[in-house]
């Protein structure tokens, strides 16, 4: 359960790579935690820090201009690989509220939406142009309006994006799927009785 | 007469508690929920915070696998990492408090979650099976609809035995021909991923069909379905047949007597009807396949073991250049003869008895090269005992390999079993992502045959030369 998703205006952090897997977002050695909090420190750990623990200057998350960003802009097939929900937990903990990419892996998208992290898929030309803009102008503002499913990009570019209606409603209202399912338990039990489960 | 349906549609339809609408996804019933230590603690916490019970402990089973040690210290599995130990304790406490059966550290039925489910006969055709682990797709080899979920969803299933799910699309992967000697199920699935790409299956459930799939044993089918997620697919499935029924007969949780007969009669209906529609179809000719190996940093970057690495001069793809830099390899070179520091045999992809037999067959009477460390990690304690009874463990030890207790081990490198930075590892596991087997580790995914042949050579080798 997360707070209702309200319209967002922020500059973005750029991770312009395709097939970013969840092992990069949060390496497995940080998965021995028993809570959801505090993973932002380890977000993209192996791309963000060198062997001595010093920040890699070239990586997007370390750019001074990226600090405070609530939007991350990635490439194609963002979040592939492991089902670890620690990936959206780490992204959210760092302060992100939306990921813009060309496409998303199924489990990652599902996990992200359950944690108040919106995923926005843009077509390849729009995404390429956004990458170029952010590379030149790291402070360029992006506005996201979920209720109208529109993203307002720099240079007066506006794009609409799709999201399934249920995820949209859950995000906008801060609705919680667990609560919704628990409320259905009588119907579930009736189904179990009827179907010999 | 109802419309022809795919295997996926038959299993999906039989588990819909409430149909999906334009506004809401379907409520899908889960027959079997597998739980492990890494992705469950926060889910149990969510239940506690709301005062909820586990709805069906009898349809839930837990094991310890991801962060467990694979070496005995003083005859016991001693967890040395404090955080991992705390997480394992949390699983034991959660299972005790919520009445969930668990195969704990000293249980002879313990093992990798996707190895023990089938091994115990808990995995059965036509079931819906979920686990907080993307390789849950393994169980699709039995004609189950099995997929990985996140920790929030683990909580949903614990509390209600249901998930809110949008219906995925369907994709047929038909494999014609026959596999040549030395070419295994692992090579086949690596070739399929190389062809359709690491996001080629996104949004789809794959059904593997065709004469090559029918000819695979259950271990091979599990290897194929296991890596469906590496093509981005939601799940992979194979229709059950006599091979499936013979494999399941007599297992601890398999039905017996009249219930077995009734189950098999029902399972025989679990196949795609003639004329059923797939949203996408792919045809693979397996006859031309060679043993495959990955060279890059995702499972789609795979080539025939004796082929040249792809040229990048005409390809502006920065991902290939990054992969070459990380792997310390050059476009156009061959992997044959490339130094190998570590060989890892194990994981939910290739840690079953047949995989160990294949590797031992290559190592019999041979030695692991002096420059190479080889770990053999059985997929479960039962696989371990069986390998010891069959003399496979002796072969591995005599060859100079390390014979370990079961677990995920070096596949995810959470338990201290790691590959060093810059080292090359030929691994029978499923992911060659940067840092997957340890920070800076360079993973080459391959079959147990190729891994064992490479251990003997101390370098990437073609197993066909040793058959």
Image (cartoon, rainbow, N blue to C red):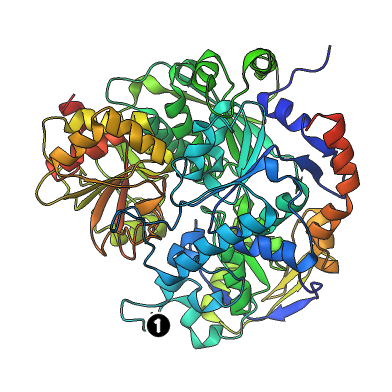
**Where in the figure is residue A105, as x and y percent of width and height?**
59, 52
Chain of the residue under label 1: A
> The N terminus of chain B appears in which quarter of the rendering?
top right
**Viewer-closest of B18 and B442:** B18
Q: Can residue B320 be seen in this view?
A: yes
Which residue is rendered at x = 79% and y = 58% of the image? Answer: A178
- Quarter where residue B359 is shown: top left
Q: In this view, does B437 lie to the left or right of B83?
A: left
Q: Which residue, as the protein is rendered here, is positioned at the far front? A: B74
**Where in the figure is residue B309, as x and y percent of width and height?**
27, 45
> The C terminus of chain B appears in which quarter of the rendering?
top left
B433 is higher (above) or lower (below) than A26: above
Label 1: state its secondary structure. loop
Q: Which residue, as the protein is rendered here, is positioned at the far bottom? A: A64
Find disc 1 in the rendering and name its residue: A55
- Quarter where residue A10 is shown: bottom right
Q: In this view, does B395 lie to the left or right of A84?
A: left
**Where in the figure is residue B222, as x and y percent of width and height?**
48, 32
**Where in the figure is residue A19, as x and y percent of width and height?**
49, 56
Which residue is rendered at x = 82% and y = 68% of the image? Answer: A174
Which residue is rendered at x = 76% and y = 53% of the image? Answer: B159
């Amino acid at each position: 359960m997360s707070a209702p998703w309200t319209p967002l205006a922020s500059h973005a952090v750029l991770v312009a790579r395709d097939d970013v897997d969840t092992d990069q977002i949060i390496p497995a050695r940080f998965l021995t935690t028993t809570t959801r909090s505090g993973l932002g420190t380890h977000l993209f750990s192996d791309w963000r820090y060198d062997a001595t623990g010093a920040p890699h200057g070239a990586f997007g998350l370390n750019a001074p201009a990226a600090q405070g960003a609530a939007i991350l802009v990635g490439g194609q097939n963002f979040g592939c690989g492991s089902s670890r929900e620690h990936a959206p937990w780490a992204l959210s903990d760092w302060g992100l509220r939306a990921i813009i990419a060309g496409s998303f892996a199924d489990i990652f998208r599902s996990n992200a939406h359950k944690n108040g992290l919106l995923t926005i898929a843009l077509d390849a030309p729009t995404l390429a142009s956004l990458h170029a803009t952010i590379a030149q102008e790291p402070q360029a503002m992006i506005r996201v309006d979920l209720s109208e499913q529109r993203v307002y990009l720099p240079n007066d570019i506006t794009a609409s994006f799709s999201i399934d209606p249920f995820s949209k409603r859950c995000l906008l209202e801060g609705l919680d799927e667990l609560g919704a399912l628990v409320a259905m338990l009588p119907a579930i039990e009736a189904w179990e009785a009827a179907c010999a489960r | 007469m109802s419309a022809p349906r795919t295997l996926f549609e038959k299993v999906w339809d039989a588990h819909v508690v409430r149909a999906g609408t334009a506004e809401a996804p379907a409520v899908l019933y889960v027959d079997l929920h597998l739980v492990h230590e890494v992705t469950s603690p926060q889910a149990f916490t969510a239940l506690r915070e709301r005062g909820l019970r586990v709805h069906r402990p009898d349809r839930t089973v837990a094991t310890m696998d991801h962060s467990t040690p694979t070496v005995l210290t003083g005859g016991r599995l001693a967890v040395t990492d404090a955080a991992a130990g705390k997480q394992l304790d949390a699983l034991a406490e959660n299972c005790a408090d919520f009445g969930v059966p668990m195969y704990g550290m000293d249980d002879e039925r313990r093992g990798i979650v996707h190895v023990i489910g089938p091994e115990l006969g808990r995995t059965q055709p036509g079931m819906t099976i979920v686990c907080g682990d993307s390789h849950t797709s393994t169980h699709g080899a039995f004609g189950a609809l099995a997929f990985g979920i996140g920790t929030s969803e683990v909580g949903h299933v614990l509390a209600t035995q249901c998930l809110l799910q949008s219906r995925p699309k369907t994709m047929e992967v038909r494999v014609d021909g026959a596999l040549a000697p030395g070419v295994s199920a692992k090579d086949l699935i690596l070739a399929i991923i190389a062809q359709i790409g690491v996001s080629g299956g996104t949004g789809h459930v794959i059904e593997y069909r065709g004469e090559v799939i029918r000819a695979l044993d259950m271990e091979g089918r599990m290897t194929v379905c296991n890596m469906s997620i590496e093509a981005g697919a939601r799940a992979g499935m194979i229709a059950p047949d006599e091979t499936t029924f013979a494999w399941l007969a007599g297992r601890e949780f398999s039905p017996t007597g009249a219930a077995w007969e009734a189950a098999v009669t029902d399972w025989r209906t679990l196949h795609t009807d003639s004329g059923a529609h797939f949203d996408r179809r792919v045809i693979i000719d397996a006859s031309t396949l060679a043993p495959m190996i990955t060279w890059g940093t995702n499972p789609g970057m795979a080539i025939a073991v004796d082929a040249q690495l792809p040229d990048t001069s005409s390809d502006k793809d920065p991902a290939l250049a990054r992969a070459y830099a990380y792997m310390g390899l050059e476009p156009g070179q061959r992997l044959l003869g490339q130094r190998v520091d570590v060989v890892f045999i194990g994981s939910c992809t290739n840690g079953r008895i047949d995989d160990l037999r294949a590797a031992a067959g290559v190592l019999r009477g041979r030695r692991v090269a002096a420059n190479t460390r080889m770990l053999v990690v059985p997929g479960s304690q039962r696989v371990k005992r069986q390998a010891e009874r069959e003399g496979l463990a002796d072969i591995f030890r005599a060859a100079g390999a390390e014979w370990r207790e079961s677990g995920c081990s070096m596949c995810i490198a959470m338990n201290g079993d790691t590959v060093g930075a810059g080292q090359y590892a030929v691994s029978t596991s499923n992911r060659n992502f940067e840092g997957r087997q340890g920070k800076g580790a360079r993973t080459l995914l391959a079959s147990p045959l190729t891994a064992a042949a490479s251990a003997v050579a101390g370098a990437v080798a073609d197993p066909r030369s040793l058959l």
